[in-house]
Amino acid sequence: MSSRSARLLVLGGFLVAGVILAGGALQAHHAVAGVYDLNKEVVLEGRLKKLNFVNPHANIELSVPDKKIKGKVVDWILTTASVQTLTRQGVTKSAMKPGEPLRVTVLPARNGNPAGFIRSLQLGDKEILLFFGDGTD
């Protein structure tokens, strides 16, 4: 085998490996059903701690009073739709301020951690549906 053929073979191998790895990352990114329980919904009411208005998915840190221990607050990390989807639904970065009350319906994390994927949120008097539940949003 010539050195040119060997270089092309190695380059082709790297290209194939890159496509496989990128495909796996894309599959993992959209595996909502693997991380969150699609058969269970939890309603949380708390105060917005932080809004990270970034792609591919914005996320919210929500401080929720613990129902079992008076005075204790649990910080939930909640993943939501893309910035574009939020904006189309009327949710902008300036629409939510830290400290404001927020009510969300989430698909909880399967591992029991205080985390979830936001299915809908209450913004003022309007409920906004953000996740349709087929595991691919």
Image (cartoon, rainbow, N blue to C red):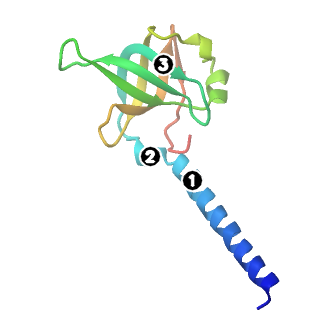
Which label is found at residue 33? 2
| Horizontal side, residue 68 vs residue 86: left or right | left
Looking at the image, tell me whether mark 1 or mark 2 is earlier in sequence order: 1
Q: Position of residue 111 (x, y in %)?
A: 31, 43
Dot 2 falls on a residue whose secondary structure is helix
Q: Position of residue 15 (x, y in %)?
A: 70, 67
Amino acid of disc 2: Ala
Which residue carries the number 1 mark? 25
Pick the residue in front: 61 or 46: 61
- Quick one: which residue is furthest to the left in this view? 69
| Horizontal side, residue 45 vs residue 89: left or right | left
Which residue carries the number 3 mark? 50
The quarter of the picture where the N terminus appears is: bottom right
The quarter of the picture where the C terminus appears is: top right
- Quick one: which residue is furthest to the front in this view? 3
Q: Judge the density around disc 3: few (<14), some (14-19), many (≥20) Cα neighbours within 10 Å.
A: some
